[in-house]
Image (cartoon, rainbow, N blue to C red):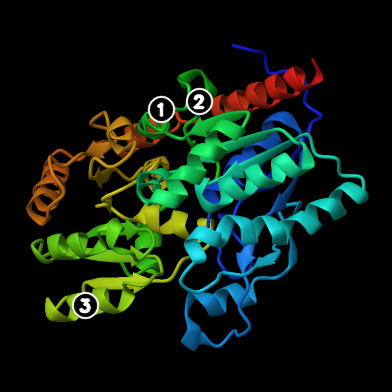
Amino acid sequence: MFGIGRQNLKLLTFTTLYPDATRARHGIFVETRLRQLQAFSGIESRVVAPVPWFPSRNAMFGDYATYAGVPYRENRHGLEVCHPRYPLLPKVGMSAAPWMMALAVAPVLKKLLREGYDFDVIDAHYFYPDGVAAALLAKFFHKPLVITARGSDLNLISHYVLPRIWMRWAAHRADHLVAVSEELKQVLIAMDVPPEKITVLRNGVDAALFRPVERGTMRRRLNMQGFVMLSVGNLVPAKGHDLVIEAAALIPDAQLFIIGQGSCETELRKLIAKLGLETRVQILENMEQAALRDYYGAADALVLASKREGWPNVLLESMACGTPVVATAAGASPFIVSVPEAGVLPHERSIRALFLSISRLREHYPDRAATRAYAERFSWDETSAGQMRIFNHIIQNKAA
């Protein structure tokens, strides 16, 4: 494959999936990949992460109020991040979102160019609406484009007729596509994208951040007792937190911490009360990665019961802290949980299968140092090198 090439290119990272001052873990995987790329290559980047416009920060409006609280500009880890607003129209929001987003972002890109930041490549994350909006902007500004597919953008949104049509257009308009798993690459191929235009670049794990902790001290500080499980992710139906709660009910000495926020929180709290698990199951809000590391390191297992996934970063984060996992066979999970040191893969997505898999993990619990060593194989260097090869190949072709 083409070489890594020059290191001084200017990148424009474009995505709605990016952390901000109000949402610490929102799209953290995009920020992490970009920071790892910068550390690896020294390239320059600016981030444009649009958010829906909303006039009120009143908590009664839920997620929309959160959007209102996002700063227009911020600096995260030395990276300049801009959050322009775009309108989400009732009824037609899904269909119109790429165009509304592109129209809102175009003045921001014009300003960047006027100020001297003549970016070489637009690096877009998430296919819809982000990837389609990025394709419109790339066409208008005559810039090369790379789009990364991450999971539900292809597994879920592509089932809608109009979004699928425009996603196919964006895929063919882009100079190259990245999929975080082989499964997502096959979805793109089914959309008539030539295989040679797609590169699979898995996510990695920051093993310096996610590392073992002093478990005894941390368990006491976090008030952990018995066999402690974590279920980490947005509180939405596809994540299967309800299945993990039901499985925990079958394990008398189990304590469960659910870490995340989302639309299902009320239903999950009702289920916890119905099963009489108020003293054994807690729901905690999203937290900074360093705090999450402490929970990973102190727990005995991470349980991921997802229906859909792209590349579930939480699995490697947990394993890097020495904590094995139980994960349903969604997305790249079977690839990640492929050795005994990693944990157990249930044979189906059900309460009973989760219970049996947790029991199996307890009976044949791996050495935590071996679990950590396995996770360390998934460094970011391979992914960063792959990105640089793609970017430089595109720039060289443009110059030719």
- Outermost residue toward the right in this view: 115
Distance between mark 3 and mark 1 Cα atoms:
48 Å
Residue at left offset 14%, top offset 64%: 246
Q: Quadrant of the N terminus?
A: top right
Q: Quadrant of the C terminus?
A: top right
Based on the displayed image, in which of its 4 quarters is residue 58 positioned?
Answer: bottom right
Residue type at mark 2 is Ile
Residue at left offset 25%, top offset 76%: 267
Q: Nearer the viewer, residue 238 or 166?
A: 166
Residue type at mark 1 is Ile
Residue 291 placement, left or right of 364: right
Residue under label 3, please give it: 279
Residue under label 2, please give it: 198
The percent position of residue 203, horizontal first and vertical second, equals: 48, 36
- Observer-side mark, 3 or 2, equals 2
Q: Is residue 89 something one can see in this rendering? A: yes
- Observer-side mark, 3 or 1, equals 1
